[in-house]
Image: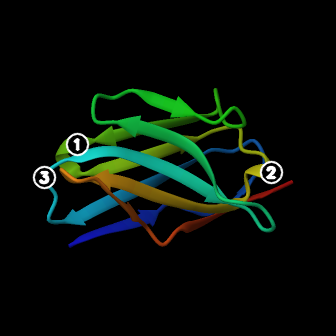
Amino acid sequence: QVQLVESGGGLVQAGESLTLSCAASGIIFSINAMHWYRQAPGKQREMVAAITSGGSTNYADSVKARFTISRDNAKNRAYLQMSSLKPEDTAVYYCAAVIGIYPYKYWGQGTQVTVSA
């Protein structure tokens, strides 16, 4: 009923910027919250940013001041603006959305971000 698709990943040089997009489609009344996670090789998946339906945001310390999460409620989209990218930001980035009266967390398939030194 609900699908999430990430886009915008790619290969960039250190110091450059990149913006990821997450599109939610299907039967959606409202999205309670949206999140961005990432998983690097050999590491556990970590949450890097979150945004609630009211617009409150939260960031991991490792990306604070460099990444910005935003959402467009009318389009059921979330974005992750990444600046001053570092090689350690290299990971598969996943979008997640919490949806429903009885909340269920949906996941996208991920998009690869590679930052070269």
Give the residue at mark 2.
88
Q: Which is more N-terminal, label 1 or label 2?
A: 1
- Depth check, front residue: 24 or 115: 24
Determine crowd level at label 1: few under 14, some 14-19, many 20+ residues with C-alpha closer than 10 A.
Answer: few
Front residue of 89 and 115: 89
Compared with 19, 4 (above or below) is below
Quadrant where the C terminus is found in the figure: bottom right
User: In front of the other: label 3 or label 2?
Assistant: 3
Residue 34 horizontal side relative to residue 114, left or right: left
Pick the front one: 44 or 26:
44
In which quadrant of the rendered image does the N terminus lie? bottom left
| Rendered location of residue 37, percent (x, y) | 56, 53
Question: Can you give x and y, in whole percent of width and height, for residue 60 in the image?
Answer: 64, 36
Do the CB atoms of the residues marked 1 and 3 lie less than 8 Å apart? no
Q: Examine the image and state in which quarter residue 33 appears.
A: top left
Mark 1 residue type: Asn
| Residue carrying label 3 | 29
Task: Give the Cα separation between the discs numbered 3 and 2.
Answer: 37 Å
Secondary structure under tag 3 reads loop
Residue drawn where x is 23% and y is 53% of the image: 102
SS class of the residue under badge 2? helix
Residue at numbered disc 1: 73
Q: CA distance from mark 2 to mark 1?
A: 31 Å
Q: Amino acid at mark 3?
A: Phe
* Vertical placement of residue 62 versus 30, above or below: above
Question: Looking at this rendering, what residue extends furthest in the front direction?
Answer: 102
Q: Mark 3 or mark 1, which is nearer the start of the sequence?
A: 3
Residue drawn where x is 52% and y is 61% of the image: 94
